[in-house]
Image: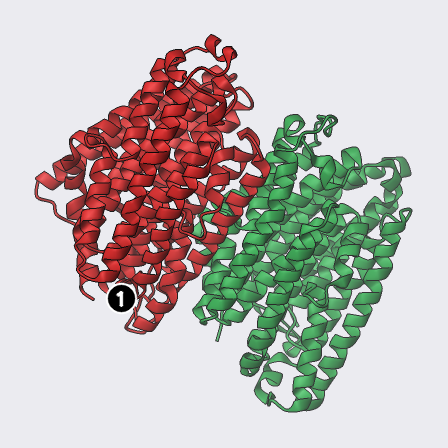
Amino acid sequence: MNILALFIIIPILTIIGILSTKDHRGTRIVSAIGMGLQLITSVVLIIMFYAERNAGNHADMLFMVDYMWFESLNIHYLVGVDGISVAMIALTSVVTFAGVFASWEVKDLPREFFISLIVLATGVFGFFISLDLFTMFLFYEVAVIPMYLLIGLWGSGPKEYSAMKLTLMLMGGSAILLVGLFGIYFNSDPSGASHYTFNIMEISKITIPMEAQRFFFPFTFIGFGILGALFPFHTWSPDGHASAPTAVSMLHAGVLMKLGGYGCFRVAMFLMPGAAHELAWIFIILTATSVVYGAFGAIWQKDLKYINAYSSVSHCGLVLFALLMMNETAMDGAIIQMISHGLMTALFFALIGMIYGRTHTRMINEMGGLMKIMPFLAVCYVIAGLASLGLPGLSGFVAEMTIFVGAFQHPDTFHRVVTILACSSIVVTAVYILRVVGVLLFGPIRNDEFLKLTDAKWFEKVSTVTLILAVAFIGIVPIWLSDLIRLSLKPILDQLSSF
Amino acid sequence: MNLNQFLIMRHELLLIGVVLLVLIAELFIKSEKKHFMIPFAIVLFLLYTIVGFLPAKTGVLFGGMYQTSELVILFKNILNVAVFIILLQSASWLRKDINHERISEFYIILLSSLIGMNFMISAGDFLMFYLGLETATIPLTALAAFDKYKNKSAEAGIKFILSSALSSGILLFGLSILYGTTGSIYFTEVAEKLVASPLLVLGFIFFVSGMSFKISLVPFHFWTADVYEGAPVNVTSFLSVVSKGAAAFIFMVILFTVFKSLSNMWGDVLYLLSILTMTIGNLFAMRQKNMKRFLAFSSIAQAGFILLGIMGASELGMTSVVYFVLVYVFSNLAAFGVVSVISDKTGLESMDDYNGMYRTNPKLSLIMMLALFSLAGIPPVAGFFGKFFLFTSAASKGYYWLVLIAVLNATISLYYYLLVVKAMFINKNDTPIAKFKSTFTDRLALIICVAGIFAIGFASPIYELIRSLSFGF
């Protein structure tokens, strides 16, 4: 059996397993086992991927499986992976695994919670392995819809409002995206024989007429961009993240927002390179705004989750920003940033959830001195913070360094100016991260109640340590990730440089 | 005319047989044993449905007045399955004492209406088409007023008969103008002699308006909400699924065959109608609190989406419409099934009554959620595929802006579908609907619907089968 099928089958089996459990203990154990298997499978996938590459298989996509689905419309179930998707799958497995442990103590309707969480993860896995625009779109929507219940039922604060806002904005994004996909589909046959295709690899071989590209590129890019928190369509993100339960914030900021960036280059830029070049300047301005605006937004927030949500807007904006620079270094950095931010922000949200679970507040000025009370969580928080502001040795440094070096390689004034502007976000990031760390962890203990609080339990340690290991691994051996990415970026760069 | 030719009308003849058998059985059954009519009629109809799937001859009868094709037979089978599900869903409602004396009446009237629809979609000329349409409509009036002791139901009946009389009048006027300009009522001959003269355009507009009443397209939709609300739940589901589906189908077939040469004109007309229907249907649906009114407006919006498929004016378009109707049958009947079960057990029909229902009746809530997701077009349930193909059909003709409006409308519709999900799953309620056990027939009906919702989307052979039978131009 093909290894990629496992990424769909294991979650389905896990869901069936969860349905047969009686209480919340059984539920979480089954979920942990299922997602643990998923993590192992993705490690096996990485090993197999390297083995294939070392054996001299330099095909664009490996482990491809192709089933005809709707024959008359030429819709296939077509899956395959390159280095980038392998890296994204690994990220998803790590975050999902950590997410299950971070929600170990969900007591209200646990079965429903874990099933929704796993459905969400399945959608994400399916999205990353799809090479057919139809299945890709299908999995994209599968990943979005469980968010409504997850936030609405298990969230906090104005959860119903946030859940509705998030779902509708993301579905609106997918609506816009769908028009773009139809545009690609109905322009995929230059011979005029009406033999259209949704197959990404086939479409990349032909050139979509320029006027069609100009019309449909914005639809596709914005459609995906909404999920990647592209300014000014990012407003779902702070509210959604703040109201979501811990594991959902982790998965959402860590993985789901990456679908946007991934889709932007895999579909919009890869298939419509001409329009990507022509219209890049508009989106560069928008994404640079995201980067700076998100960082400044984070400064003003007092709620830990809002700080992180705005910081995610900033960092995800940086991903899109780097992609639009369209050179090897910057795009390389964009992918590393996706992985790095995914892990780091998941870690952040996990820690915030754990702290909130103890202190029952997320306002930084109500807390202080947590380093003395819960040293383990506090140290983890410092690590996450340092990774986020790009300390060398952790993943954030590698990503941001590569991005800005790549972006600065453009000799013209426009690119240099926006790059310098975007660079300023690094400083701002340092301000808000260090402020939080200072007030939250090192200040005086402001509430005597807090003295009774305990440090991390074992399952919380599993969750955080998994993520920290991954962050450090990328920071110390970035070459491993770059290797995966570089070869896979080549077809995309070739496509882009042909214009 | 020999037996073989007669068998071309198998669906209609058998259905008349079923109605007569029910009528005869009614004469001989004792008053206190009337409820035995329920299983009798259901089993009889099930047999008829199964026979309908056996391979059948196609052909033309009565000099072109009546015609069937593989696609028409398939569509009749879809309607049969829908009616079968409705019969199952209505069983526990009919069992109530208040309906005891009128069980057979319900079956006879409902199935007579179905006979009319069968004739209507098999029509080969405008006379048969009109006769079928009226045969289908008049019994529906009686059905809408079936709960005659309720004011709302009586109101629904009178509203329905008045508005359908008006629309039939308009339709008939349009048809007579068509006859006047072309000199024929046969579809094939009208299509040949069709020349776009001002008078003919007038007739065409009247025809479209009349049909728009039947399919309840905006701005001809005003009767819908009141009738849907007043009629008994099972009649409402019959109106919104079977009646609407059949009318949409024959509307499409007539546009594709008879008005082929006017396709530019009806393209524009439908463009406008579909935008109006989707948008206004959605805007009104958002504000509804009564579940039946809510589903009524949602089904108005759905009709707007169907028009997108018709506008494709191709094989793909016809496939997507028939496929969408098939998906819509299962999703809408699942939603109506839940509403019907709850209304039977508790008499509650308001959205606020559904608050917190998941905690007491998880299975019903899940089915409702699946049905609503399917109506909204969320994967992996079948509604996603249905909507996707409709959009594909419109996009294939280059109507990208229309597709954009339609998908944005689908997002808006998701909002109000989620309101129901929110009520059931998220809202807190101190006195949620008590836990209850539904009857065997209700459960069977819901199981069939859920199986359909899941299976039809993934089963591409069904799509390909419809595709192989469809035609365009």
Q: Colour of chain B?
A: green
Chain drawn red, letter?
Answer: A
Residue A200: image x %, image y %?
Answer: 29, 56
Quadrant of the rendered structure where residue A89 is?
top left
The residue depicted at 50 percent of the width and 64 percent of the height is B403
- The reply to whether residue A81 is in sight is no
Residue A316: image x %, image y %?
Answer: 35, 44
Badge 1 crowding class, 10 Å Cα cut-off, few under 14, some 14 to 19, many 20 or more, is: many
Q: Is residue B33 left or right of residue A260?
A: right
The residue depicted at 40 percent of the width and 51 percent of the height is A230
Q: Is residue B330 left or right of residue A454?
A: right
Q: Which residue is mark 1?
A: A274
| Kind of residue indicated by mark 1 | Gly
Q: Is residue A374 left or right of residue A169?
A: left
Q: Work out whether residue B451 or residue A163 is closer to the camera in this orientation and state it.
A: A163
Check the image and name the residue furthest to the top.
A452
In the picture shown, does residue B9 fall above or below A99? Answer: below
Residue B143: image x %, image y %?
Answer: 81, 53
The residue depicted at 41 percent of the width and 38 percent of the height is A299
Q: Work out whether residue A428 or residue B172 is closer to the camera in this orientation and state it.
A: A428
Q: Badge 1 sits on which subunit? A: A
Q: Quadrant of the N terminus of chain B?
A: bottom right
Q: Is residue A350 left or right of residue A245?
A: left
Q: Work out whether residue B331 or residue A209 is closer to the camera in this orientation and state it.
A: A209
Q: Work out whether residue A464 or residue B250 is closer to the camera in this orientation and state it.
A: A464
Where disc 1 sits, the SS reads helix
So how many labels did they put on this image? Answer: 1
In the picture shown, does residue B292 fall above or below A213? Answer: above
In the picture shown, does residue B2 fall above or below A467? Answer: below
Report the colour scheme: by chain
The residue depicted at 30 percent of the width and 65 percent of the height is A275
